[in-house]
Amino acid sequence: MAERRAQESGLTEKVLTINRVAKVTKGGKKMSFSALVVVGDGKGKAGFGYGKANEVSEAIRKGLVDARNGLFEVPIVGTTIPHEVMGKYGAAKVLLKPAAPGAGVVAGGPIRALCDAAGIKDILSKSLGSDNALNVIKAAVVGLKSLRNKEENRRIKGEGSK
């Protein structure tokens, strides 16, 4: 798939899927396209976008705009995530586990692209349930957004005031 680096913003862009949709009308088939795109800076920020249009290039452009608008922070400890987490979206479930340094990104498809974009170097993941790329990536985003680092845990539990 296509991957490129945007010079002005320092974000890595990766097109995950391009889907062709045919709507049958009385005048014939009307073709349109949808594109699932992931962007990230490799330093703890990532996002995904979904664009639909009558042309592939326009769908990708819309997806990139959506992805840049939806950037979020991912807490990273060393080269991995702080703790194990399960993300759920629709019928898709994604299990994300921290891994030892040097283990690499053990993830498939959309989760791998999202972790690479965020700058996570070592992680174990398992996709459970649905294999729909859009729902899997949304479940992974739910999981990554629910991650907490040690400082946030102390603050939430009230231990930081001691």
Image: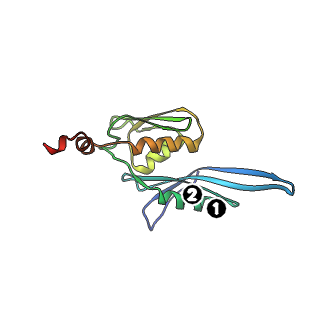
Q: Residue furthest bottom?
A: 8
Residue neighbourhood size for the residue with mark 2, other residues' Cα within 10 Å, grouped as few (<14), some (14–19), many (≥20): many
Color theme of the render: rainbow
What is the quadrant of the C terminus in the image?
Answer: top left
Instruction: Choose the circle earlier in sequence order: 2 or 1.
Output: 1
The residue that label 2 is drawn on is: 63
Q: How many marks?
A: 2
Residue 95: numbered disc: none
Residue 57: numbered disc: 1
Residue sitting at x 41%, y 50%: 118
Q: In this view, does 78 lie to the left or right of 70?
A: left
Q: In this view, does 161 lie to the left or right of 92?
A: left
Q: Position of residue 99 (x, y in %)?
A: 36, 35
Location of residue 81 (image quadrant): top left
Circle 1: residue type: Ser
Residue sitting at x 58%, y 42%: 133
- Can you tell which of label 2 and label 1 is closer to the viewer? 2
